Image (cartoon, grey):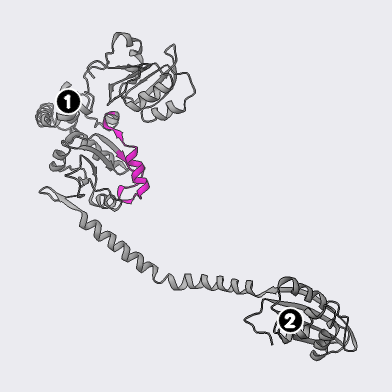
Amino acid sequence: MQSSDTTKYIIHCKLNADGVIERPDIVGAIFGQTEGLLGSDLDLRDLQKTGRIGRIEVIVNTKGGKTKGNIHIPSSLDRIETSILAASLETIDRVGPCTAKIEVSQIEDVRATKRKQIVDRAKIILTEMFDENLPESQEIAEEVRQSVRIEEMEYYGKNKIPCGPNVLDSDAIIVVEGRADVLNLLRYGIKNTICVGGTNVPPEVAELTKKKTVTAFTDGDRGGKLIIKELMQVADIDYVARAPDGKSVEDLVQREIVRALRQKVPVEQVIDAYSIEGSAKSATPVAKKSRITRVPKRKERAKPEVARQTSKLIKLAEPIERKESRHRPERRSQSRRSYPPEASRFNQHSEELTGTLSARLLDDKDKVISETSVRDLVNTLKNSEDKIKSVVFDGVITQRILDIASSKGIENLVGVKRGNIVKNPTSVKVYTAQGA
């Protein structure tokens, strides 16, 4: 008898006979009519004796003087021999006293059936058995991460301001809004962060910003903008980074944090966008000159009170002005910028762009080809196919802009001031406002 452990294929046949026959008649016909047909190597009796063919199963049903049935023959032969054996069964035309017809309907691969069963069972095991332990493992891992982050968190100053462990040792720091923001950045290995705890910036943080290169990293909402405005008044920040619109820093994943910090903007390029608008009528010329003196003024107060507060703020602002000349352009009381005589033809463009944070691309006749924002200037220059000869913009001339201008054949760059430029190509003339 054929062992089920060695069965590779099962031959499925259908039987139709014109008469009443039984199982022994069908088995006898199979052995008798195929004997000697395929030679000694494929003789059914010899194959069954050696265990290469299993027990022949027959299921018959007699109705109305006719017999129908199914025949199943297990085989451990290879695919070719099994196919030959199956084809030989269709040569049987009589079973007992009746005419009959046998037709092979299917050859089942037992191993493929077992593989399908394995796959189906593995799916059930994976979904039903592993799922019960998976949340627990995630909770353990998250608990460990949370404890590590809390252990790494330190506190700065007498007010115990949450910060990362590298705030004091690092030359550059990131100022965020709250404790949750510090924890999220610690989660991704950013350890030079400190929070302000809202719109009321602690004096310790304001003092710390004088000694470091500072990036303000706030939420992408109105509250984040207000915090940047206050930091520009009471602290000394160098760059501004924002979370995507509508998102908080504490909710960002690693790639979003890295993208936002890479897209940080020098504070001098956004100073007008984040300046607090006071009462234009009550603002004094001194207040226009310094960013720190631009504070909201209550309309119900009398003008003498406004003047006294402005004077007091100017005195408080004097020690914070230490890095002003190095990082930010002076806010001149004059509305016109003065350029060298050889760049006087760009004066009109510069005057129209003042305070807009925009840039104009000019042709060889100083006519405007296109206009874009300072933030998009680098990409615009890279992708432009126009013959640009001059660029006038309301921003800082950086080494990157200068290199792109040189590669694009641009002859003149006109900006508010020069940034940290190491190499100045001879093919590009750089003009800045006198005194900038």
Q: Is residue 259 left or right of residue 435?
A: right
Q: Quadrant of the N terminus?
A: bottom right
Indicate yes or no whether the magenta region holds residue 252: yes
Residue assigned mark 2:
72
Q: Which mark is residue 193?
A: none
At 76% from the left edge and 72% from the top edge, which residue is drawn? 83
Indicate yes or no whether the magenta region holds residue 69: no
Foreground residue, 149 or 110? 110
Q: Counting other residues with Cα less than 10 Å from the Cα at mark 1, is it few (<14), some (14-19), or many (20 or more)?
A: many
Q: Residue furthest front?
A: 40
Of callouts 2 and 1, the N-terminal one: 2
- On screen, 94 above or below 138? below
The answer, for residue 282, to whether it is visible in the render is no
The answer, for residue 77, to whether it is visible in the render is yes
Query: Label 2 is placed on what type of residue?
Result: His
Q: Position of residue 406 (x, y in %)?
A: 40, 21
Helix, strand or loop for disc 2: strand
Q: Is residue 11 left or right of residue 292?
A: right
Helix, strand or loop for disc 1: helix
Q: Is residue 397 left or right of residue 78?
A: left
Residue assigned mark 1:
287
The quadrant holding residue 15 is bottom right
At 37% from the left edge and 47% from the top edge, which residue is drawn? 255
The quadrant holding residue 85 is bottom right
Separation (CA) of disc 2 from disc 1 = 100 Å
Q: What segment is highlighted magenta in the picture?
A: 241-268
